[in-house]
Amino acid sequence: MDKKITYHEQTDIQNTLRLREVLKTLPPFCKDYFRAIDATTTAKTRISYAYDIRIFFQFLLEENPAFKDYSMQDFKVDVLDQVKALDIEEYEEYLKVYHSGDKTETNGERGLKRKVSALRSFYAYYYKREMIQTNPTVLVDVPKIHQKSIIRLDADEVALLLDYIEHCGDQLTGQKRVYYEKTKERDLALVTLLLGTGIRVSECVGLDIEDVDFKNNGIKVTRKGGNEMVVYFGPEVEKALKNYLEVREGITPLNGHEHALFYSTQRRRMGVQAVENLVKKYAREITTTKKITPHKLRSTYGTALYQETNDIYLVADVLGHRDVNTTKKHYAAMDDARRRRAASAVKLRED
């Protein structure tokens, strides 16, 4: 019997093949760097780095007169020594708005920081191995990121969202009603699971039927970086999943999709985009001021868990954050609310 290839293994294979194609569009010497970071990064991360580093070389070709007669394949490793700190600063400026083919690309704070960080990592590799004499990237400040407030659903909005998914069919007619009835239990199970466990959308679509354990009310998820972990769920998630599994039994999946927990209407494993679309579709009906995505449902869960337990380490563990500082950064605003309560808790003078 053939060994079952998991969703995450399949995605890794596809990303590895995609990375090979992207590397063909980079200067040949870059392959050494990507081989070196293979053991410490995912294929998805390496693809992002490859795209980011390719933009840097495109910038040199387009904006630097010294390379006006070069093609991408002409660059050798010594080109890195010809770049000065001023060029890196100009590159940061270029990244804010540039043209890629017919498209105009823009980068905000996060995009800028990621692209500069990718270039720093790239330079550090060749510098440490003494293949270049200079590293101008360390002379330039990494763009600062300003924290945005967390968008999350309030407790009453969570109840409204689940109620809406459960009952909105009453307002529908014709084909819309038929489609809703067909997907209702799946959609309710999906949104309840995201709200009740805080798992990432990529972890959710990667779930197989065998990953659900009703004996212990847990699901086995594959975290970022490939680690497996059991996340536990409560009775509401259990009920929603069991109702959906009854419907799922009547679905004959397409070949190769037999193990998937959540099926699309095409009887294949649901993708990330499909889950994002359905969350947005339902959330739009209960709030017009908040742009709700699956990640915002994750924030909603993290917030609720922190409010209930006041245990930032537990929240970090359950959300699968490798560094508790990531969690602190996201949920520190709630400590601020507690500090405000402290201000009014102490009376200096009796009324």
Image (cartoon, helix red, strand yellow):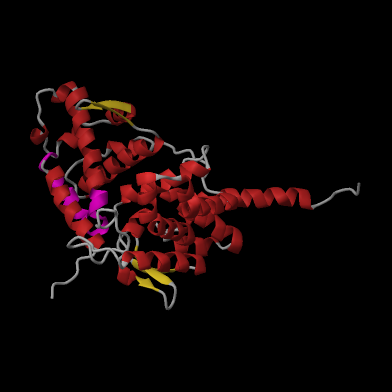
- The front one of 129 and 285 is 285
Magenta stretch: residue 28 in it? Answer: yes
Answer with left or right where residue 297 lies relative to residue 19.
right
SS assignment for the magenta stretch, majority: helix
Q: Of all residues shown, which one is farthest toward the front?
A: 174
- The front one of 141 and 100 is 100
- The segment highlighted magenta reads 25-46
- Residue shown at 21%/57% (left/top)? 12
Q: Of all residues shown, which one is farthest toward the right?
A: 351
- Residue shown at 35%/37% (left/top)? 111
Q: Is residue 318 above or below residue 184?
A: below
- The front one of 111 and 267 is 267
Res. 113 in view: yes
For residue 51, which quarter of the picture? top left
Q: Position of residue 129 (x, y in %)?
A: 19, 50
Magenta stretch: residue 196 in it? Answer: no
Q: Is residue 268 above or below residue 140?
A: below
Q: Position of residue 347 (x, y in %)?
A: 84, 50
Q: Position of residue 323 (x, y in %)?
A: 43, 58
- Residue shown at 35%/32% (left/top)? 107
Res. 292 in view: no
Q: Position of residue 45 (x, y in %)?
A: 27, 50
